[in-house]
Image (tube, rainbow, N blue to C red):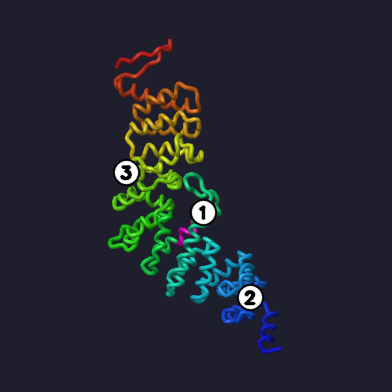
């Protein structure tokens, strides 16, 4: 037995962290035959020191061994974290590659840290890892029609990714990874002032990057950023132009996911700059091309987009007769929101016909008539006589 074989046999029988570190260091420089033997030894161990070696050298593993590594995602995650915390540039590049292929938003903060590595190759790998984590979060986070997270687990993943992007945004001047800024625009609502302050800084590099790349980055994931931009004078024109070019159903769905913005007047004032948007037409006649949840929010958008009151009333008049109960209900509420004489006329008809919204319409019309009556007769109020008849009280 050769000296190398005796050493290998000795290490094979030692499962301590120290032995794992020796095997991991040897794996980086081992010839193929020995590399396989070392990797198989490390695969049977569950300690971080074993898995950081496997992750750090994953580019040199045969396909069958790499498949066995990937079959243990919890240990892979431990190895990625360890490699990113203290590995060489080569180890970090491999770890980031694995993170990109197996996104784990909980580790995205380590990718954000890796953006500051001196190696440009590592920085690019870190950007790709963040990109994969961001896509994973957006594609695998169950949400309602307003885009709100439904489960604590998905909300935690979302928060971890946003925290990593916030740090990456703050350090952009050092890492200069342009694609990171595109990711930040995807999460503009969550980043809030952290993003808009950087975009409004005098001679801001980030502002220049966005101006140069916004059209190239076009897509539904920009919906939140573009809608927020409508409320900001410096960005309104660009946002209007880009939203005006959207004409696909996916664009409409992306916009509807931000329907909660309709509750904020400072936002809806900006929405009026979107006039006759082509993407609205993709909902189909009677909104038939949308899900029930999506159909239920479209009528309120009509009240805030750049239509005149006549156009709004004609549209809502048609929809309030819809056979879809959610469309009928939403259209009646939208007519009440309009608060115009023409809308009141339609709601008066709704109040006289059987239907689920009859009681609401009756209350609304009665309230409007009572208000008008009080306005017209400010000097008297009705008094109920014992007979039940009404007569004005003389001052």
- Residue 350, picture quadrant: top left
Q: Secondary structure at mark 2?
A: helix
Above or below residue 255? Residue 117 is below
Note whether residue 120 is visible. Answer: yes
Q: Earlier in the sequence, mark 2 or mark 1?
A: 2
Which element carries disc 1, helix, strand or loop? helix
Residue 178, picture quadrant = bottom left
Query: Around disc 1, counting alpha carbons within 10 Å, would you say few (fewer than 14), some (14 to 19), or many (20 or more)?
Result: few
Residue in the foreground of this view, choosing between 12 and 156: 12
Q: CA distance from mark 2 to mark 1?
A: 34 Å
Label 3 residue SS: loop
In the image, taking residue 157 as reference, residue 363 lies left or right, namely left
**Rendered image: mark on residue 139:** 1
For the residues marked 3 and 2, what is the alpha-carbon distance in whole angstroms? Answer: 61 Å
- Disc 3 or 2, which lies upstream in sequence? 2
Highlighted range, magenta:
159-164
Q: Which mark is residue 39?
A: 2
Residue to which mark 3 is pinned: 273
Residue at 46% across, 69% down = 114
- The 10 Å Cα crowd at callout 3, few under 14, some 14 to 19, many 20 or more, is many
Q: Is residue 301 left or right of residue 84?
A: left
Which residue appears at 64% of the width and 68% of the height? 68
């Amino acid at each position: 037995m050769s000296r190398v074989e005796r050493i290998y046999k000795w290490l094979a029988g030692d499962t301590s962290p120290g032995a794992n570190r020796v095997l991991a260091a040897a794996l980086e420089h081992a010839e193929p035959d020995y590399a396989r033997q070392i990797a198989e030894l490390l695969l049977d161990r569950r300690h971080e020191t074993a898995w950081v070696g496997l992750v750090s050298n994953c580019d040199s593993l045969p396909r069958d061994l790499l498949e066995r590594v990937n079959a243990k995602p919890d240990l892979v995650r431990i190895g990625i974290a360890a490699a990113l915390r203290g590995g060489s540039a080569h180890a970090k590049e491999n770890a980031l590659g694995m993170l990109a292929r197996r996104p784990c938003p909980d580790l995205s903060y380590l990718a954000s840290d890796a953006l500051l590595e001196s190696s440009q190759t590592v920085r690019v790998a870190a950007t790709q890892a963040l990109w994969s984590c961001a896509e994973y979060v957006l594609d695998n986070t169950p949400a309602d029609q307003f885009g709100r997270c439904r489960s604590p687990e998905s909300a935690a993943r979302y928060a971890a990714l946003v925290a990593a992007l916030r740090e990456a945004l703050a350090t952009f001047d050092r890492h200069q990874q342009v694609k990171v800024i595109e990711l930040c625009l995807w999460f503009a609502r969550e980043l809030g002032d952290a993003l808009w302050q950087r975009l409004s800084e005098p001679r801001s590099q980030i502002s220049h990057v966005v101006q140069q790349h916004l059209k190239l980055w076009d897509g539904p994931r920009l919906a939140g950023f573009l809608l927020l931009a409508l409320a900001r004078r410096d960005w309104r024109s660009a946002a209007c132009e880009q939203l005006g070019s959207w004409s696909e159903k996916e664009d409409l769905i992306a916009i509807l996911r931000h329907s909660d913005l309709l509750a904020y007047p400072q936002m809806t004032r900006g929405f009026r700059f979107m006039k006759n948007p082509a993407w609205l037409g993709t909902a189909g006649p009677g909104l038939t091309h949308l899900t029930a949840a999506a159909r239920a929010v479209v009528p309120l958008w009509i009240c805030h987009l750049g239509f005149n009151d006549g156009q709004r009333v004609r549209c809502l008049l048609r929809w309030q007769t819809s056979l879809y109960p959610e469309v009928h209900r939403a259209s009646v509420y939208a007519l009440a929101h309009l608060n115009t004489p023409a809308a009141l006329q339609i709601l008066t008809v709704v109040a006289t016909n059987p239907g689920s919204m009859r009681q609401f319409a009756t209350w609304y019309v009665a309230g409007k008539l009572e208000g008008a009556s009080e306005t017209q007769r400010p000097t008297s109020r009705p008094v109920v006589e014992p007979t039940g008849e009404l007569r004005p009280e003389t001052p």
